[in-house]
Image (spheres, rainbow, N blue to C red):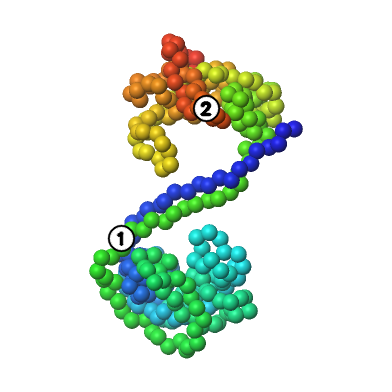
């Protein structure tokens, strides 16, 4: 059996969110080295602040300032920091109840080792030298010998140039393996061939193959070469340029049913003005030099396919 492919894969996108009154004040306060919480209906001070009382679900807006010192309520040692974590040396994840607060804040503690960390230890905020209105404005906590005495003080939550939205990058790194069926499909593409697999029960040919028939639930193993030409079953016009994709907008991305296949695959349509692409258009793959998959599909010049020939593949 040929070796099954695997490769690192990264999925990432920036998530932009607007901030309400409470979160705006909290993050702006961090920029100004001010720690804010919110007073709940039962008198507790919640840090980080929330906009709705977790007990009654009532809206809460009474902001208070708490101290930059606190007590570790629990912790876990991290011996191997990962990319983009707050510190690049081993550290402890800690829940810290700041003086004046009744709930704990999750952050990191800069300590020489796990033997230097304990529940109940006193800590203090180390502020980042450059702050922008984000939780990372707290660079970390550090051990600090003091008694807990500060009480929360009322705060208006008003600042000059408040932070009103944040961009939170989301990223997932993992190793992806396409499995036996799609490994064969990818290897065939490198030879400029399209290969699917036929279900032994319903006889449908799936491209790309999935290793099993989604309708009958049985394994597929019979390989069938399809195409190379196919029919556009449906499409969309893309007007937003994707990051790291050197394609001018607008362009067309389509579902293409290759001849002999019972499942449409995705592909970009080129060689024709975007506003002339249509359902039923007959297309063929165009390979770039050394490419392992089609760069795009272009019109073959044949008459459009009759709707009845591809309507079940839309």
* x 55%, y 82%: residue: 120
Tell me which corner region of the image, top left, top right, bottom left or bottom right, holds residue 45: bottom left
What residue is pinned by disc 1? 164
Q: Could you tell me residue 163's position as x and y percent? A: 31, 63
Q: Secondary structure at mark 1?
A: loop
Query: Which residue appears at 30% of the width and 60% of the height?
Result: 164
Residue 260 position in % (x across, y down): 58, 17
Instruction: Tell me which corner region of the image, top left, top right, bottom left or bottom right, holds residue 118.
Output: bottom right
Residue 53 seen by the camera: no
Query: Does the rendering let one see residue 155?
Result: yes
**Which is in the foreground here, disc 2 or disc 1?**
2
Q: Earlier in the sequence, mark 2 or mark 1?
A: 1
Give the SS element for disc 2.
loop
What percent of the width, then of the height, locates residue 204? Answer: 62, 22
Percent position of residue 7, x then y = 61, 43
Marker disc for residue 289:
2
Of 47 and 294, the residue lying toward us: 294
**Residue ranking furthest to the front:** 289
Q: Quick check: 180 left or right of 117?
A: right
| Residues at marks 2 and 1 touching, judged by CB atoms closer than 8 Å | no
Look at the picture and state if 245 lies above or below 138.
above
Image quarter in which the N terminus is found: top right
CA gap between label 2 and label 1 equals: 48 Å
- Left or right of 155 in this view: 252: right
Task: Name the one closer to the observer, 284 or 158.
Answer: 284
Identity of the residue drawn at 39% across and 72% down: 129
Residue neighbourhood size for the residue with mark 2, other residues' Cα within 10 Å, grouped as few (<14), some (14–19), many (≥20): few
What is the residue that sits farthest to the left in this orientation?
160
Q: How many marks?
A: 2
Q: Which mark is residue 188?
A: none
**Residue at screen point 36% across, 75% down:** 33
Categorize mark 1 by other alpha carbons within 10 Å: few (<14), some (14-19), many (20+): some
């Amino acid at each position: 059996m040929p070796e099954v492919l695997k490769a690192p894969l990264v999925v990432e996108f920036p998530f932009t969110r607007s901030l309400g009154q409470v979160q705006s004040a909290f993050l702006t306060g961090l920029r100004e080295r001010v720690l804010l919480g919110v007073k709940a209906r039962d008198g507790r001070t919640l840090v980080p602040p929330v906009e709705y009382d977790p007990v009654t679900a009532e809206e809460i807006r009474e902001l208070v300032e708490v101290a930059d010192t606190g007590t570790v309520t629990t912790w876990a040692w991290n011996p191997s920091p990962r990319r983009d974590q707050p510190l690049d040396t081993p550290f402890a994840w800690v829940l810290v109840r700041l003086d004046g607060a009744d709930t704990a804040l999750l952050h990191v503690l800069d300590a020489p080792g796990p033997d230097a960390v304990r529940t109940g230890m006193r800590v203090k905020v180390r502020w980042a030298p450059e702050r922008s209105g984000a939780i990372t404005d707290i660079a970390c906590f550090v051990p600090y010998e003091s008694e807990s005495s500060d009480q929360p003080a009322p705060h208006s939550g008003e600042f000059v140039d408040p932070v009103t939205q944040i961009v939170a990058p989301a990223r997932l790194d993992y190793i992806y393996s396409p499995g036996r069926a799609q490994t064969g499909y990818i290897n065939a593409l490198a030879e400029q061939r399209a290969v699917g697999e036929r279900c032994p029960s319903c006889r449908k040919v799936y491209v790309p193959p999935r290793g099993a028939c989604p309708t009958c639930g049985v394994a597929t193993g019979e390989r069938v070469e399809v195409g190379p030409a196919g029919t556009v079953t449906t499409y969309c016009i893309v007007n937003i340029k994707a990051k790291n994709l050197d394609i001018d907008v607008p362009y067309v991305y389509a579902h293409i049913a290759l001849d002999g296949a019972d499942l449409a695959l995705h592909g970009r349509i080129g060689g024709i003005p975007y506003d002339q692409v249509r359902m039923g258009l007959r297309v063929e793959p165009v390979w770039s030099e050394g490419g392992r998959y089609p760069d795009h599909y272009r019109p073959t010049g044949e008459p459009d396919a009759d709707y009845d020939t591809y309507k079940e593949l839309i």
